[in-house]
Image (cartoon, rainbow, N blue to C red):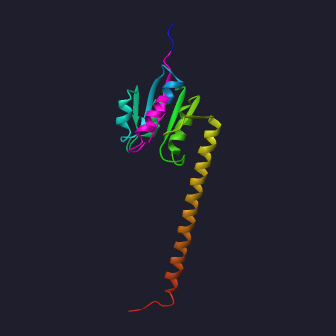
Amino acid sequence: MRDAPRHTFLLTFARRGEEAAIREAFAALTERHPGAQVHAVGTPVSEPVLRQLGLERVLIYQRGKHPGRMLEEAQLCMPEAVAIVYGGEDFRGHLKLEYLALRIGAHQILRCREGQPAVRLSRGRLAGVVLGKTCHLALRVALGMAVALVVCAALCLIGRGGGSRARRP
């Protein structure tokens, strides 16, 4: 009986200029999981470099395409590993990719940044990162709403009284 093919996923929302980071993440996946089929989730900008790597499947995230379908397709592959490609100098942003990595259900999660070796993350640590970033985002939204409410209330009060220097025609 033949073994089922093994799968890995490369997750990137890379922008122009991050092609090297994608290639390094691909190399890390193929080195750690030789013989596994590599699939990818990317954007129209990252698609050309992903296609050049000869990946088994490239799922393109773009407006109008339902993200739930992409998640279902990725989960059906039952990948043993995912690699998240980070562009830039730090690990800010990428909340969608980190959440996707958790939802795909792979046993191994790699954090890849250009010029640095791939770092393995536990699912628990990545879940903590996702939770922290989500809470930070919720706090920023709540703060923005509070500021908007205060400004709106102030404008209503000023409009009601007509202001002390309001001119009448």
The quadrant of the picture occupied by the C terminus is bottom left
Residue 81: x percent and y percent?
Answer: 54, 28
Q: Is residue 91 above or below residue 156?
A: above
Q: Is residue 76 above or below residue 41?
A: above
Between 120 and 62, the residue placed more toward the observer is 120
Image position of 65 (left or right of 107): left
Residue 95: x percent and y percent?
Answer: 53, 45
Q: How many numbered dots are placed on residues in this image? A: 0
Residue 48: x percent and y percent?
Answer: 34, 36
Magenta extent: 4-27
Q: Residue at the front extreme?
A: 115
Between 3 and 92, the residue placed more toward the observer is 92
Q: Residue at the top extreme?
A: 1
Residue 39: x percent and y percent?
Answer: 44, 29
Within the magenta stretch, is there residue 11?
yes
For the point 58% across and 30% down, the residue is 108
Residue 50, image quadrant: top left
Between 105 and 129, the residue placed more toward the observer is 129
For the point 50% across and 21% down, the residue is 34
Within the magenta stretch, is there residue 115?
no
- Is residue 72 at least partly visible in the picture? no
- Is residue 58 at least partly visible in the picture? yes
